[in-house]
Image (spheres, grey):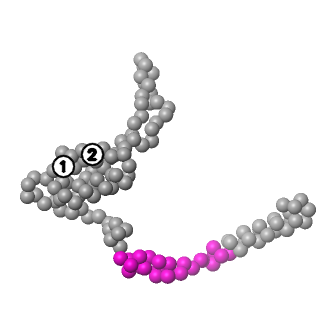
């Protein structure tokens, strides 16, 4: 069993990728560790009011038996695995223009008229707002 404690997300990523690259371990399993103290006096048992939000990560993996081959997990491609055509497929031009509905346009026009009326009434009173 391999157990690693790392303090930052960057370290977590690097250690996990290094473990995967060896091909000798199962998929790394990361867990975030949190620390919260407890107040214990007789029947008055409760968590402390203050909690440290993050203390580190534990990452575990099991060594594979000699000759065992781990099937790669089904994962979504990382950003570095996207090609230019993948990025182009999600640009606004490729997705098409988003057309506003007539109902939405009428609502926006009514709101603009209401705000313009408020602005005129404040200007007529001379309060300068």
Residue 62 numbered tag: 1
Find residue 81 and report its horizontal and vertical position in percent.
33, 71
Count the numbered circles shown. Answer: 2
The part of the chain drawn in magenta is: 83-106
The answer to whether residue 45 is left or right of residue 23 is right
Tell me the quarter of the image containing the N terminus: top left
* Quarter where residue 78 is shown: bottom left
When the figure is inspected, residue 50 is found, relative to residue 30, above or below; the finding is: above
State the image quarter where residue 102 is shown.
Answer: bottom right
The quadrant in which the C terminus is found is: bottom right
Residue 55: where, in percent of width, then height?
A: 39, 41
Q: Residue at x 16, y 55 (%)?
A: 24
Cβ atoms under marks 2 and 1 closer than 8 Å: no
The crowd level at tag 1 (other Cα within 10 Å; few <14, some 14-19, many 20+) is some
What residue is drawn where x is 31% and y is 56%? Answer: 14
Label 2 Cα neighbours within 10 Å, binned few <14 / some 14-19 / many ≥20:
few
Kindly identify the residue that appears in the image at 68 percent across and 75 percent down.
Answer: 106
Q: Is residue 41 magenta?
A: no
Residue 120 percent across, percent down from the top left: 85, 68
Please indicate whether residue 98 sits to the left or right of residue 21 in the image: right
Q: Is residue 29 above or below residue 106?
A: above
- The extreme left residue here reads 67
Q: Which residue is mark 2?
A: 4
Element assignment for label 1: loop
Residue 53's x, y, as percent?
Answer: 45, 41
Residue placed furthest toward the top: 42
The label number, if any, that marks residue 100 in the structure image: none
Q: Is residue 43 above or below residue 111?
A: above
């Amino acid at each position: 069993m391999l157990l690693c404690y790392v303090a930052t997300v960057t370290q977590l990523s690097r250690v996990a990728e290094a473990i995967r690259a060896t091909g000798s371990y199962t998929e790394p399993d990361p867990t975030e560790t949190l620390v919260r103290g407890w107040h214990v006096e007789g029947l008055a048992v409760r968590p402390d009011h203050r909690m440290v939000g993050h203390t580190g990560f534990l990452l575990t993996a099991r060594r594979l038996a000699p000759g065992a081959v781990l099937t790669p997990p089904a994962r979504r491609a990382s950003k570095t695995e996207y090609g230019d055509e993948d990025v182009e497929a999600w640009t606004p031009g490729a997705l098409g223009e988003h057309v506003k509905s007539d109902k939405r346009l009428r609502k926006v026009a009514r709101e603009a008229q209401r705000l313009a009326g408020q602005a005129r009434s404040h200007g007529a009173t001379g309060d300068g707002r």
